[in-house]
Amino acid sequence: MFEALKDPSLCSRMMDEVEPCVSRDDGIDIVKLSEQDLLQSSYAEVLRLRVAIAMTRVNEFADFNLDGYKIKQHQTMVIFSRTSALNTEAWEQAGRTLVKPLEEFHAERFLVDPDDSAENGEVKKETCKEDLSKKSKFSLDGLAGCWIPYGGGQRMCPGRHFAKNEILGTFALLFSEYELELGDVDVSKVQPDLGWYPVGALPPVCKVPFRIRRRV
């Protein structure tokens, strides 16, 4: 909601995807909504920057070397999602050519050109809003170790699909039924409060005033 409110152009494009999924008679078609490409990309980008978790894993099988560190069998490790979310080298090794630095919000981060493929068939290059005329597609291909707001592997959050529908559905409902605008706030100062790292969603470091009223 915050990213949409501070960027009217982005908000307009997101609502272009919301409108076909909402009707007065039938409410929100949550399945159709959750398949919209820009909405999915914006959602994934918000979680990348605004969720910071820690995962514990145990090395069950054998000693191995991790960048010069010896990890012994049965040793417990902690994996931090924000570290990989901001690791440019890891994202590039995953096959993503970054349009904007990972420290910045980029709504199109997870949109890719279906025609820009590697030899193994994985999409390679993220897009920008000027490229949307190509109808780029949402994709998490190759990012299993980079985008992990829900954890990973067999212990990945089982409620992730419900959470996605809840987030996108709430956005669609509020922006369809209400007029919203930011109050007097310096948007550059609205940053995630890392004091909550690594227990989940990061609230903003300051209060964010806004106005809301029901659409007539």
Image (cartoon, rainbow, N blue to C red):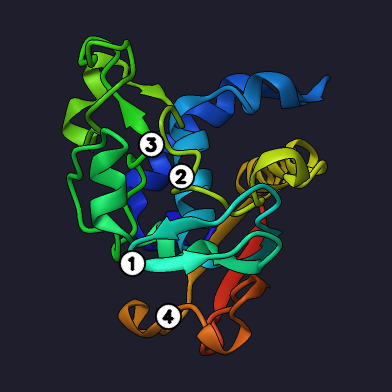
Q: Secondary structure at mark 2?
A: helix
User: Looking at the picture, does residue 195 appear above or below residue 95?
Assistant: below
Residue 42: give its label: 2
Label 4 sits on residue: 190
Q: Quadrant of residue 212?
A: bottom right
Q: CA distance from mark 3 to mark 2?
A: 8 Å
**Mark earlier in primary sequence (4, 3):** 3
User: Looking at the picture, does residue 177 appear above or below residue 20?
Assistant: below
Q: Secondary structure at mark 4?
A: loop
Residue 68: give its label: 1
Image point (53%, 84%), residue name:
193
Near mark 2 (Cα within 10 A), the count class, few <14, some 14-19 or many ≥20, is many
User: Looking at the picture, does residue 33 appear above or below residue 7?
Assistant: above
Query: Quadrant location of the N terminus?
Result: bottom right
Near mark 1 (Cα within 10 A), the count class, few <14, some 14-19 or many ≥20, is few
Q: CA distance from mark 2 to mark 1?
A: 36 Å
The answer to whether one can see residue 159 in this image is yes
- Whether residues under marks 2 and 1 lie with C-beta atoms below 8 angstroms apart, the answer is no
**Mark earlier in primary sequence (4, 2):** 2
- Whether residues under marks 3 and 2 lie with C-beta atoms below 8 angstroms apart, the answer is no
